[in-house]
Image (tube, rainbow, N blue to C red):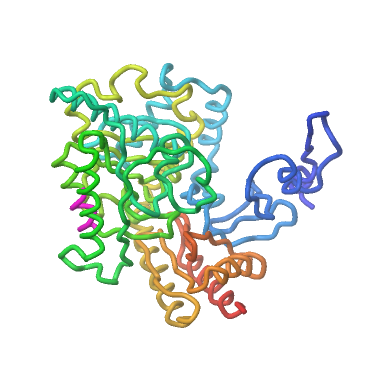
Amino acid sequence: MTAQQETVRDVVSTDVHGPREAATDPVAALKAHVTGDLLNIVVDLDAGDGCRLRDARDGTEYLDMTMFFSSAPLGHGNPGLRTPEFEAALVRAGRVKPSNPDFATAEQAHFAETFRRVVGVPELPLLFFIDGGTLAVENALKVAFDWKTKVNARNGIGVRGSRVLHLERAFHGRSGYTLSLTNTDPAKIRDYPMFDWPRIPSPAVAPGERWDSAELLPEETNALDAARAALRRYGREIACFVYEPIQGEGGDRHLRPQFLQAVQELCREHDVLTVADEVQTGALTGQAWAHEALGLEPDLVAFGKRLQVCGVMGGRRVLEVADNAFREMSRISSTWGGSLVDMVRATRILEVVESEGLFEHSRLMGELLLGELRDLTAEFPSAIHQPRGRGLMCAITFHDPARRDRALAIARDSYHALFLPSGPDSLRCRPPLSVQPAEIIDAVTALRNTLKDLP
């Protein structure tokens, strides 16, 4: 046993009465007191290579197509995150946790500059940072509420902007305002108080399946009609329309640009802001932002996950109100405004992405992965269908949801390959931007063997 593995085994668990004997397994120790859906894996933070994650207890390697729900964009053990200079910067930033909205540091300024250079959108110059994708979306909504109320007042209309137009099968978080938008797994929202905000159908279309139709499809027309009906009913109360370019939690459901552009135009006609929730899609779909590939021009973009620091980019029509919520002191804020340690890590990740051309690389690797999934679907048509993807955001759907769940377990336990569920019946892949062809082939081989083993 290595010294690292001995250290893991010596983790001490405590209860309200004080220390207990040393825990032999951190998974069991955590499960006893900490809420979570822990896999039976203890991550070795000093090991790992690319898509290979190592269990610190016994050295077992897993082929990781989850990347911590897509928040490890350079994979495990990337040399760019192992340099003495970077590790020294992490230690320096970790010695104190400053309130970033109130106290400037060179580290935060360097991160903001790097963010704008590598993934910034010129038309969205305003930035707000915070911990958590849910709070990123929540603050985007607050910007929209503030904006719409001020626009109404400027037009002599005494109505608050207090409603959000949103889609069925959406996931925008599980806190505060976002709870009223999320409508995927009922267990995540059941019995919690929520606002009665207008919800319209989500006319997702798998790429390749009527995807190139120039005209709106019948289901898209119905959804657009539902949006018009909501605007007639609530009028000036609707502050914004929020959407995921690809609905991840809802099942990797792709929305056509023709539909989203039509809703965007409708929103402009009614002084309603558009909010792209790119917490899941940002820096994953072969370029910085999925909305750009779809030809969309949102007024606000929520981001997180691969960017390490969550937050909001704002501009376009938001700038029509000079004292918008980005600019009015303390209108939106938090104590810490994101973590300085996360900013240091994010800066380095973005520098690696930029210097190694990983957006283009991920686009090419996404084409390879999608092609392999299409071949797999043709091989097992009675088990899976609908291979789909944009960049490295790829998925397949099982005809039987129970078989999907069994497949995840078989892949993990028999072939040491980790995949994620998506929606009620889909399996999603979230490899890092730096994934290599051999790792993709190994992942699909594990899936192929899993499908052969399915009862």
The residue lying at 31 percent from left, 36 percent from top is 163
Q: Main secondary structure of the magenta part?
A: helix
Residue at the extreme right = 21
Q: Position of residue 377 (x, y in %)?
A: 44, 77
Q: Residue at x 34, y 50 (%)?
A: 244
Between 12 and 214, the one nearer to me in the picture: 214
* Near-viewer residue (360 or 273): 273
Report the residue at 79% width, 53% height from top. 1
Q: Within the magenta stretch, is there residue 261?
A: yes
> Residue 14, percent across and down?
79, 34
Query: Quadrant of residue 239 in the image?
Result: top left
- Magenta span includes 29: no
Judge left or right: residue 142 versus residue 95. left
Q: Is residue 172 above or below residue 59?
A: above
Quadrant of the image occupied by residue 417:
bottom right
Span highlighted in magenta in the image: 257-263
Q: Nearer the viewer, residue 369 or 276?
A: 276
Residue 347 at least partly seen = no
| Residue 157 x %, y % | 17, 25
Q: Is residue 448 above or below residue 199?
A: below
Q: Position of residue 263 (x, y in %)?
A: 21, 50
Residue 364 in view of the camera: yes
Task: Choose between 371 and 159: the one closer to the eye.
Answer: 159
